[in-house]
Image (cartoon, rainbow, N blue to C red):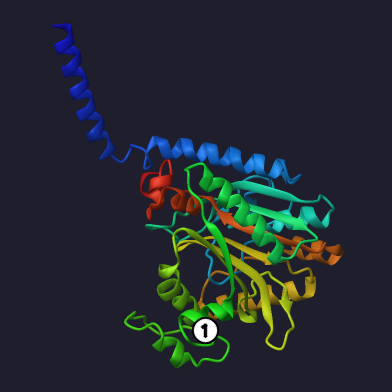
């Protein structure tokens, strides 16, 4: 009798659990994924502790925002005492600027593992708040940092019994070998034609936009799932916060690391010139003005830090949710988040 009753209880409990999973209070990700994330975070901290890279915490809110025209920032109003400073505060899109201020102050190699925020980015592979790992290595360039970034990804994959070899290719060679066009000299019409049957509204798109579309729609889908591919030395027009190397054909000293079709990390041989950085901020703001977008304040404290003497270094940002997605072989970011945007 008691055995029968226990069986009925389990059955009804199981049915209730299945019903709960369809409710929006229930976690987005399986418990196994959440436990794996905890192990991944521990692996990251061990990885850097063994290499003498110090974990730090920096502000999530700032008086300055990210000027990048392709990234939208959240902002809020602070109602307490500001001693004359702006009440508008911007949620960080990465911890890059304060980490660089620490480097300029002489702190040394450091990293941060924490939440960042980007407005308008929600969907299958994006969440408005997500976890970013960012670190900096003094005296390194972007090519050396590729190896360490790949080593960290390999340590993460080992948690799920997987491996992936590292391959490298220059940005220009990638397009020439796989799309049979030279991204440095192909016309905009040739770039558009290389998209094939991918139909895109061309209104307002720049040359770099077409190159990006070729990457996301033609190149990334073909990347092998058992291979890490480091694409390095980008067009100078896509320099972001990287140094430009003045070769016969100038290139931005940066890389992106892919595992299969997923972009995991974006690294730079960091720009150390305050005047050039200020000019890039201003160009970003001009683009924003032309689009009618918000104009976040420039980070003047970062510019002061660069002017005070910024050390030669390389840095990289890695999306931890993307890494989790790659580890588990899922295309849905909700599968690796306790509660995704729709359930937050």
For label 1, the SS is helix
Residue 82 seen by the camera: no
| Quadrant containing the N terminus in the rendered view | top left
- Numbered disc total: 1
Residue toward you, 295 or 273: 273
Quarter-wise, where is residue 240 in the image?
Answer: bottom right
Q: Is residue 300 above or below residue 210?
A: above
- Residue at image coords 78%, 75%: 275
Q: Is residue 151 left or right of residue 208?
A: right
- Residue at image coords 58%, 46%: 155
In the rendered image, residue 205, in percent from the top left (x then y), is placed at 46, 83
In the rendered image, residue 298, in percent from the top left (x then y), is placed at 68, 67
Q: Is residue 16 above or below residue 22?
A: above
In the rendered image, residue 26, in percent from the top left (x then y), is placed at 33, 37
The residue that label 1 is drawn on is 176
Q: Is residue 95 above or below residue 143?
A: above
- Residue at image coords 65%, 61%: 146
| Quadrant containing the C terminus in the rendered view | top left
- Residue at image coords 23%, 34%: 18
Quarter-wise, where is residue 184 in the image?
Answer: bottom right
Q: Is residue 171 left or right of residue 326?
A: right
Residue 291 seen by the camera: yes
In the rendered image, residue 212, in percent from the top left (x then y), is placed at 49, 76
């Amino acid at each position: 009798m008691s055995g029968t009753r226990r069986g009925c209880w389990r059955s009804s409990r199981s049915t209730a659990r299945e019903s709960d999973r369809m409710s929006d209070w229930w976690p987005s990700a399986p418990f196994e994924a959440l436990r794996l994330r905890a192990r991944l975070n521990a692996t990251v901290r061990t990885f850097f502790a063994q290499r003498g890279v110090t974990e730090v915490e920096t502000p999530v809110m700032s008086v300055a925002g990210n000027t990048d025209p392709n990234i939208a920032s959240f902002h809020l109003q602070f109602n307490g005492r500001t001693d004359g400073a702006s009440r508008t505060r911007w949620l960080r899109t990465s911890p890059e600027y304060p980490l660089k201020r620490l480097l300029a102050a002489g702190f040394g190699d450091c990293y941060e593992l924490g939440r960042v925020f980007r407005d308008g980015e929600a969907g299958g592979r994006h969440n408005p708040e997500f976890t970013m790992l960012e670190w900096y290595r003094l005296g390194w360039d972007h090519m050396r940092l590729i190896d360490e970034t790949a080593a960290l990804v390999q340590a993460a994959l080992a948690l799920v019994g997987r491996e992936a070899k590292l391959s490298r290719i220059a940005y220009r060679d990638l397009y020439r070998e796989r799309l049979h066009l030279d991204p440095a000299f192909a016309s905009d019409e040739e770039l558009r034609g290389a998209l094939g049957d991918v139909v895109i509204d061309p209104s307002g798109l720049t040359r770099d936009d077409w190159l990006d579309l070729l990457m996301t729609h033609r190149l990334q889908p073909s990347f092998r799932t058992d291979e890490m591919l480091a694409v390095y030395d980008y067009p100078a027009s896509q320099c972001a916060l990287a140094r430009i190397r003045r070769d016969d054909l100038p290139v931005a000293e940066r890389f992106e690391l892919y595992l299969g079709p997923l972009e995991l990390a974006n690294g730079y041989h960091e720009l150390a010139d305050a005047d050039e950085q200020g000019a890039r901020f201003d160009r970003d703001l001009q683009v924003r003005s032309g689009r009618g977008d918000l104009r976040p304040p420039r980070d003047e404290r970062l510019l002061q830090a660069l002017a005070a003497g910024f050390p030669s270094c390389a840095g990289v940002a890695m999306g931890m949710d993307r890494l989790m997605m790659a580890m588990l072989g899922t295309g849905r970011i909700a599968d690796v988040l306790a509660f995704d945007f729709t359930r937050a």
